[in-house]
Image (cartoon, grey):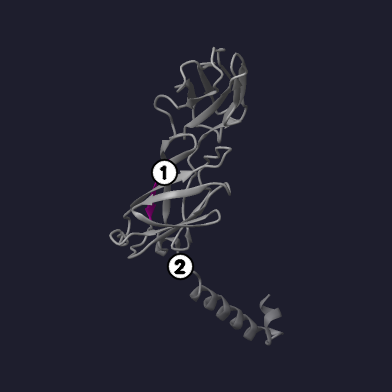
Amino acid sequence: MADNLRSHPARRPAARLLTLLVLAAAAVAPPSPAGAVPTCTVRHQVTVHWGTGYQAQVTITPGAAVTAWTAEFDLPDPQQAVTFAAYAWLGQSGTHVTLANASFNGTVPAGGSVTALIGVHTNPNLTNTPPAAFTVNGQPCAYSPQPYVIASPARPVVPEGGTATFAVRLSQAPAAAVTVPVGGAANPAMSASPASLVFTPANWAVPQTVAVSSPQDADTTGQTGQLNLTVSGAQPVPWVNAVVISQQLDDD
């Protein structure tokens, strides 16, 4: 190999050039992750759920110190609307929602957090799913959508003296078994079975059927009732509860 290089001296400058290029590339290499600006994180937690809407707490951790912040997200359904916000300025255009700091909470130190409250009015189909992603000051944030209970249809029609059914499943696989009691009817005449549903990491996506029945009464007025699908006990994740609104039609 040495003899081959001595017989071709023109290759030596090329080797020096290659070395210089490697050194130059190393000089402009991006900084290591240890020197990167900490990423922002957002937590969206439903705190109150009333069937036709919900209230959520939005906790924002910008990562780096800021003197002003703007959080943005898209609602999953075009018929949803954010009807109020607390501790933040609110704007909505179509499904796109903007939350900006109030006059008293724009400054957040590195590692600090700030919280806002939002109220979301849902569409007639009761789509109460959480947002899929958040940005803060234009930067995509670390965020995991809160898992939730899905009822379909969300507003079953139950005739007096009859029965209607709807299906229930989870939005994602739980880490362990999750028990979903069925109950809390606002109209005591309504009844539902079974009394609870159990979802596991193996069957979470398989819909389970709930039957709602209503006895016949003497009047000619239709009634409405509400069923809560709540998550009981110490669960591995904070599941969003579903509220099923059942319409009872009087067929007298």
Image-based side of 49 in relation to 150, left or right: left
- Classify mark 1: residues with Cα within 10 Å, few (<14), some (14-19) or many (20+): some
Residue 203 in view in this figure: no
The percent coordinates of residue 149 (x first, y second) are: 52, 32
- Classify mark 2: residues with Cα within 10 Å, few (<14), some (14-19) or many (20+): few
- Which of 109 and 12 lies nearest the eye of the viewer? 109
Residue 81 in view in this figure: yes
Q: Is residue 91 above or below residue 19?
A: above
Q: Residue at x 53, y 49 (%)?
A: 75
Q: Determine the secondary structure under disc 2.
A: loop
Considering every residue shown, the one lying at the far left of the view is: 104
- The magenta segment: 55-61
Q: Which callout, 1 or 2, points at the residue further toward the start of the chain?
A: 2
Q: Which residue is mark 1?
A: 56
Quadrant of the rendering where the N terminus is positioned: bottom right
* Magenta span includes 92: no
- Which of 47 and 186 lies nearest the eye of the viewer? 186
The percent coordinates of residue 186 (x first, y second) are: 45, 23
Q: CA distance from mark 1 to mark 2?
A: 38 Å
* Magenta span includes 57: yes
Image-based side of 67 in relation to 11, left or right: left
Quadrant of the rendering where the C terminus is positioned: top right
The percent coordinates of residue 212 (x first, y second) are: 57, 19
Q: Residue at x 43, y 29 (%)?
A: 235
Which residue type does callout 1 highlight?
Answer: Ala
Q: Is residue 218 above or below residue 104?
A: above
Q: Which residue is mark 2?
A: 31
Query: Comparing marks 1 and 2, which lies closer to the viewer?
Result: 1
